[in-house]
Image: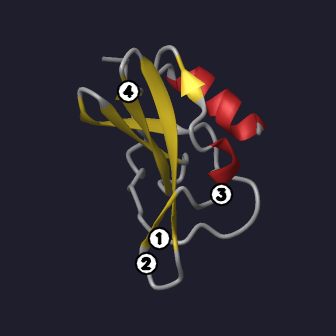
Amino acid sequence: MPHTPTLPPDFTPTFTLVPPGPLASPLQLLPVNADVLAVHTADGAHVGSLKKIGAVWKFKAMGYDEAGAMEPGGGPLTDQHNMQFQTPDAAEVSARLLAG
């Protein structure tokens, strides 16, 4: 399991529509279980998950509509959906997903 950074005391995960514009960085990886990490912006917005599929970690984008309904494959990182990583390194994940 990757090292999870110490989150700021004011970090609160949120699950709502992310407004257009740059995302607060760096991205944070929060463990869900041994094969899934939730991906949140630095200010708490949920933008997807990393899922271990076989030996590869894949990013699964997630968005929310104005009513709060989940939109799998959507959201601000939809173009990075299915991006692959060898390890769930928070710095690499943040750099690659936000560079897209």
Frontmost of labels 4 and 3 is 4
**The furthest residue to the left:** 33
Question: How far is the residue under mark 3 from the one under mark 1?
Answer: 12 Å
Considering only order in the chain, which callout, 1 or 3, is on the residue closer to the N terminus? Answer: 1
**Disc 2 marks which amino acid?**
Gly
Give the percent coordinates (x, y) of residue 50.
Answer: 44, 35
> In the image, what residue type sits under mark 4?
Ile
The spot of residue 33 in percent (x, y) is 22, 34
Q: Position of residue 20 (x, y in %)?
A: 73, 67
Circle 1 is placed at which residue position?
Answer: 16
Q: Which residue position holds label 4?
A: 53
For label 3, the SS is loop
Residue topped by disc 2:
68
Callouts 2 and 4 close, C-beta under 8 Å:
no
From the image, state whether disc 1 or disc 4 is nearer to you: 4
Q: Residue at x 50, y 19 (%)?
A: 89
Task: Judge depth for marks 3 and 1 and give the one in front.
Answer: 3
Q: Earlier in the sequence, mark 2 or mark 3?
A: 2
> In which quadrant is the C terminus drawn?
top right
Where residue 44 appears, as percent x and y from the top left, is 47, 54
Q: Image point 53% across, 83% down: which residue?
A: 66
- Left or right, 71 with reference to 9: right
Q: Amino acid at mark 1?
A: Thr
Do the residues under discs 2 and 1 have CB atoms within 8 angstroms? yes
Q: CA distance from mark 4 to mark 3?
A: 23 Å
- Marks 2 and 3 sit apart, C-alpha to C-alpha, by 15 Å
